[in-house]
Amino acid sequence: MSILADKIEKFILHKLLAEEEENIVLRRNELADELDCAPSQISYVLSTRFSNDKGFIVESRRGSGGFVRIVRIARKKKADRMPVMLSERRPAVSISLDDLDGLLFSLLKHKAVTNGEAIMLHHTFRALFAEIDDEPKRIAVITRILKSLNLRPNM
């Protein structure tokens, strides 16, 4: 199974790189036909090699109109990132999309949000960075969004 799993993983990674996007949408049945394997083998590769721990969010819908969306979360090493909080009482001076992706990754890891919620939040934050140039306004909107989340107490 590992040779086929490697082939499926390489194919999906190639698609991610070829699209030059941070996410792709695939049809599991079409992908299985193209790679000459069962759809369950695609599911296996997605669950083992494209997990949250490896920096991916996978959203899957089954059925005839089903699809698989794979979102790559760019995570930086803690040493490379600027601290978000300067002190316990002072507000953030700067926050990056990578900081927010790290937060979403942590929330996913602790099952405080679902994959779908994390994807939606990621795209919301990305749109905020594209549309709002004023850093204090952007931070205010992000803070309001994060405060309004009704996070599950599983953290």
Image (tube, grey):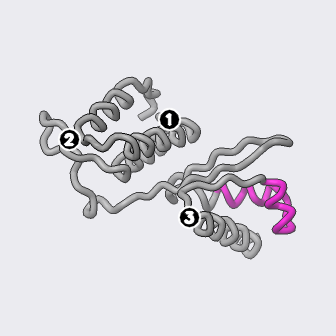
Which residue is identified by label 1? 113
CA distance separating discs 3 and 1: 27 Å
**Callout 2: 10 Å neighbours few (<14), some, many (20+)?**
some
Total labels: the figure holds 3
Above/below status of 88 relative to 73: above
Above/below status of 138 relative to 53: above
Residue at coordinates 69% horizontally, 61% vertically from top-left? 45
Give the prevailing secondary structure in the magenta stretch: helix
The picture places residue 118, in percent across and down from the top left corner, at 51, 40
Front position in the image: 136 or 14: 136
SS at badge 3? loop
Horizontal placement of 85 versus 19: left or right? Answer: left
The label shown at residue 49 is none
Q: What is the quadrant of residue 62 in the picture?
A: top right
The label shown at residue 92 is 2
Question: Is 38 within the magenta?
Answer: yes
Magenta residues span: 28-47
Question: Is 18 within the magenta?
Answer: no
Front position in the image: 127 or 143: 127
SS at badge 2? loop
